[in-house]
Image: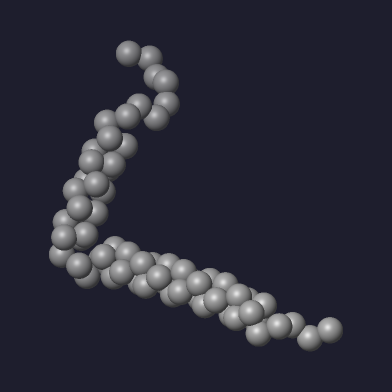
Amino acid sequence: MEKSITEKLYELEKEIDSLRDENESLWFLLEEFEKSNLINPEYKKNFDEAFKKARFHSLMSVRKVTEA
């Protein structure tokens, strides 16, 4: 039994919605990737600050127990 035109249209509309959603998700991911690129000066500045803080905390922490 062949599907009616209405059923085919409904299926196509669902597929179009799905593809639109996927397209929007991909554009969002591309924009986020571009923002997180280390070449981006703002991101590099934030990364450097976070790295310095992490390095400082790792240097200030005691790694093994010794006698005082």
Location of the C terminus (image quadrant): top left
Judging depth in this view, the residue of 27 and 43 nearest the camera is: 27
Residue 33 seen in the figure? no
Judging depth in this view, the residue of 3 and 40 nearest the camera is: 3
Please tell me whether residue 3 is drawn above or below residue 61 in the rendered image.
below
Residue plotted at (46% across, 69% down): 21
Residue 57 in the image, given as x and y percentages of width and height? 27, 35
Residue 28 seen in the figure? yes
Residue plotted at (39% across, 30% down): 63
- Taking the image as shown, residue 5 lies to the left or right of residue 61, namely right
Q: Quadrant of residue 10?
A: bottom right
Please tell me whether residue 65 is drawn above or below residue 42 in the rendered image.
above
Residue 5 in the image, given as x and y percentages of width and height? 66, 85
Judging depth in this view, the residue of 57 and 10 nearest the camera is: 10
Residue plotted at (27% across, 31% down): 60
Location of the N terminus (image quadrant): bottom right
Residue that lies at the very extreme toward the right in this rendered image: 1
Residue plotted at (20% across, 60% down): 44
Colour basis: one colour
- Taking the image as shown, residue 33 lies to the left or right of residue 1, namely left
- Taking the image as shown, residue 64 lies to the left or right of residue 11, namely left
Residue that lies at the very extreme toward the top in this rendered image: 68
Residue 42 in the image, given as x and y percentages of width and height? 16, 60
Please tell me whether residue 10 is drawn above or below residue 62 in the rendered image.
below
Residue 26 in the image, given as x and y percentages of width and height? 42, 72
